[in-house]
Amino acid sequence: MATAGASADLPRLGVVVNPVKVELKELRRTVAAAEKDHGWAESLWLETSVDDPGQGVARDAVDAGVTAVLVAGGDGTVRAVSEGLVDSGMPMVLMPAGTGNLLARNLGVSVNRMKEAVGTAFTGEDHAIDAGIAEITREGGETEAHAFVVMIGIGLDAKMIAATNADLKKRVGWLAYVEAIARIFKDVDAVRLRYTLDGSSPRSTSAHTVLIGNCGALPGGVLILPEAKIDDGFLDVVAMRPRNLWGWIRVGTALVWENGVLHKSRVGRRIMAADKRVRALRYFQGRRMTLGFDKPEEFEIDGEEIGLVTHVAVRVAPAALIVRIPKGERERLGAAGQS
C-alpha cells in the first residue's frame, strides 16, 4: 500500500502518439529510461485515431492528472491536442514527427531529435503562448469551432493544400505543395470577401490568399508574417493581392527580400517604411476578425484541409496554451519578441 501511495504522488507524463507518424517501440524505450532517471511514475500512453485525432485523448490525459503531455506526431496531431488543452493549464511538450512541424520551428524546438524532446518533458520550463479560435460556417449553415496554433488560410493557400498529393507528400515532404500550386495556379481566381477587424465597419476587398496567423514562419524558412509573435495577444493577417505576373513577382520579392532580409534590421525596416508603392501584400493586426465570402471557399487550418466555408470568425485566446520548452529558451523567445 505504501508503494502504491508513493507512486501516486510521483509526477507522471502523458504521451499522445500518432502511431502512423512515430516509431512507437523506440519512443517507449526512450520514455522508460527518462522515467527511471528522473524518478517519475510510469507514463500514461494514449494513441490518436481517425475518430479522435487528438482532442479527446488530450482531455483524457488532463482528467488523469498527468504532469505534462508529450505530443508525438505531425502538425495535425499537434493542432488537435492543442485544441484539447486550450485553457487547461496543462503543459504540452512537442516531439515533431511530421512534414512541416510548424509550431516546433516557430518555437525553435529541434526536429527529429527524440531523446532531446523526451528530455524536455522531464526537465524543461513552461511558457504561455496564444492560440487562435476559428468559428466557421459551412455551406448548409452548420457551424464548427476549431483552435489553431500556427495559422489559417483561405484562397490559393487552402486550394493548394486541398490539391496536394498525399503519397507525394510522404515521399518529398513540403515540396509536394510546390507541385500542387504549379498544377492549380492558373485556375485559381481571387476571393471576394467582406471583413471586419476588431469590430470595425465591414469592408470589401479581393485577394488570392488571406492568412491569419499566430506564428510567422512557413516551411523552408519563409517569413510570411514578419510581425507575428506567438505570445503577444494578437493575430497577424496578410492578404496577397497581386493583379498580374508582376504582382506575383512583387509578392516573391517581399517574402524573400523584405521579410527575409530587410525586416531583420532597423535600417531595413526604415527602407520598407519609406516605400510608398501599393503593395501586393497587405498586413493587418488585431484580436478578432470576421470574413464572409461571395461563394463557398476552401479553408485550411495549420496545414490541414477543412473543406468549403462561407464565413469565418476568428479571435485570439491570449496565453491559452502552455508549452514546455528546453531550459533557457524562454529568454530567447522573450528577446525575439522585443526585437
Image (cartoon, rainbow, N blue to C red):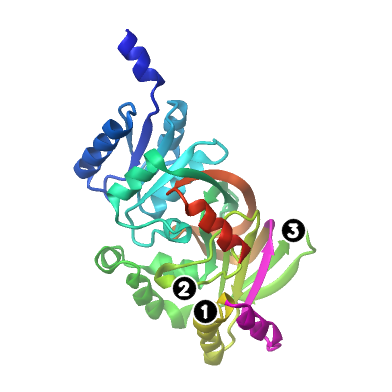
Element at badge 2?
A: loop
Residue lying farthest top?
A: 1
Q: Who's the residue at 54% across and 44% down the image? A: 321
Q: Is residue 226 above or below residue 114?
A: below
Residue 255: mark: 1
Q: Is residue 172 above or below residue 311?
A: below
Element at badge 3?
A: loop
Q: Who's the residue at 54% across and 66% down the image? A: 154
Residue lying farthest bottom?
A: 246
Q: Is residue 199 above or below residue 326?
A: below
Query: How packed is label 3: few (under 14 Cα within 10 Å), some, or many (20 or more)?
Result: few
Give x and y (percent) for residue 183: 37, 79
User: What residue is pinned by disc 2?
Assistant: 222
Chain part drawn in magenta? 265-288
**Nearer-the-camera pick, 240 or 9:** 9
**Nearer-the-camera pick, 140 or 144:** 144
Q: Is residue 183 above or below residue 64?
A: below
The disc, 3 or 1, on the residue closer to the chain's N-terminal end is: 3
Q: Does residue 198 belong to the magenta stretch?
A: no
* CB within 8 Å, label 3 to label 1: no
User: What residue is pinned by disc 3?
Assistant: 198
**Nearer-the-camera pick, 119 or 20:** 119
Tell me the quarter of the image containing the N terminus: top left
